[in-house]
Amino acid sequence: MRISFFEEFPTKANLSRLKLVDFPTRLYAAAKSIKEFNRIRKDCSKYMYVQEVCYWPVLREEEGYWFSAFSDAEGLKRVIKELEKNERQLTVLWDAELPYLKKSLVFSQATNVFKNKKLIMDFLQNASEHKIKVVTAEYSVKNKLLAKLFQFFATTFDQDNFKHAKILMAYSSAIKNDSIKSRIQFLKKQYKDFQLGIGMLAPGMGNEPVMTIEQLDKDLKAAKSSGIKEVVIYRLGGLDKRNIRTIKKYV
């Protein structure tokens, strides 16, 4: 099973955790511009087992941070315009989530929902023209009505709408009333192919609890036994000698 990592805060200290990785891996590194991302990619170049560093664009916090029909319209346009200027092969993680701690955006951008959704879909459907391979990070939900709403808000995407890889987030902190194995079995019935996002090894933008070694082992075991080909762990900055031993059991 291939194991990759998210890093939302790609400081040199967090990126240095790559020295613990002695198996081929992929890193999704968050940045607010391609210029910033290129500096991060250069910092990763000395770690021999990193086969690919992927650009994870994020908006400013006041713009919603993640991407959805409720994100700030100008922020969306800025990021998409920059991506459309891309001239080299690039894998882009499109982090499709509702606005970060910005309920006000849901109201202020309500009139832009349809325009924002069209902007997002036009870009994603034509990304290959700009040498961009799209990987979407999406909620994993069982509720059918909620799934339809998320699709309307451009936070989940039909695999037939455009060519893309899909990471479905099944963090232990977010599926408290469901087992990871049950969630994987449900997702396999719904999607042709997907990667599984698990976590958390270290805190993110919110106050989500960090998973225990036992939970990490349980999640990885469930993924491997269910035939998942690639797991993406949130996040690299929480990697240490103890949990890397657990991770290496499943590579």
Image (tube, helix red, strand yellow):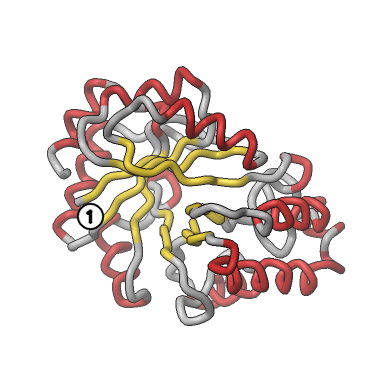
197, above or below 115, in the image? above
Give the secondary structure at mark 1. helix
Please tell me in which quadrant of the rendered image residue 215 appears: top left
- Report the residue that reaches farthest toward the bottom: 160
Between residues 60 and 189, which one lies in front from this camera angle? Answer: 60
Going 33% across and 70% down the picture, which residue do you hit? 193
- Report the residue that reaches farthest toward the top: 13
Going 22% across and 55% down the picture, which residue do you hit? 223
> In this image, 205 relative to 158: left or right?
right
Question: In which quadrant is the C terminus drawn?
Answer: top left
> In this image, 240 relative to 64: left or right?
left
Measuring from the top left, give residue 84's x and y in whole percent: 67, 59
Q: Is residue 97 visible?
A: yes
Between residues 173 and 230, which one lies in front from this camera angle? Answer: 230
Going 65% across and 67% down the picture, which residue do you hit? 123
Going 52% across and 76% down the picture, which residue do you hit? 162
Q: Which residue is mark 1?
A: 223
- Report the residue that reaches farthest toward the front: 87
Measuring from the top left, give residue 151's x and y in whole percent: 58, 73
> In this image, 38 relative to 181: left or right?
right
Measuring from the top left, give residue 32's x and y in whole percent: 66, 39
Measuring from the top left, give residue 57's x and y in whole percent: 60, 46
> In this image, 219 relative to 127: left or right?
left
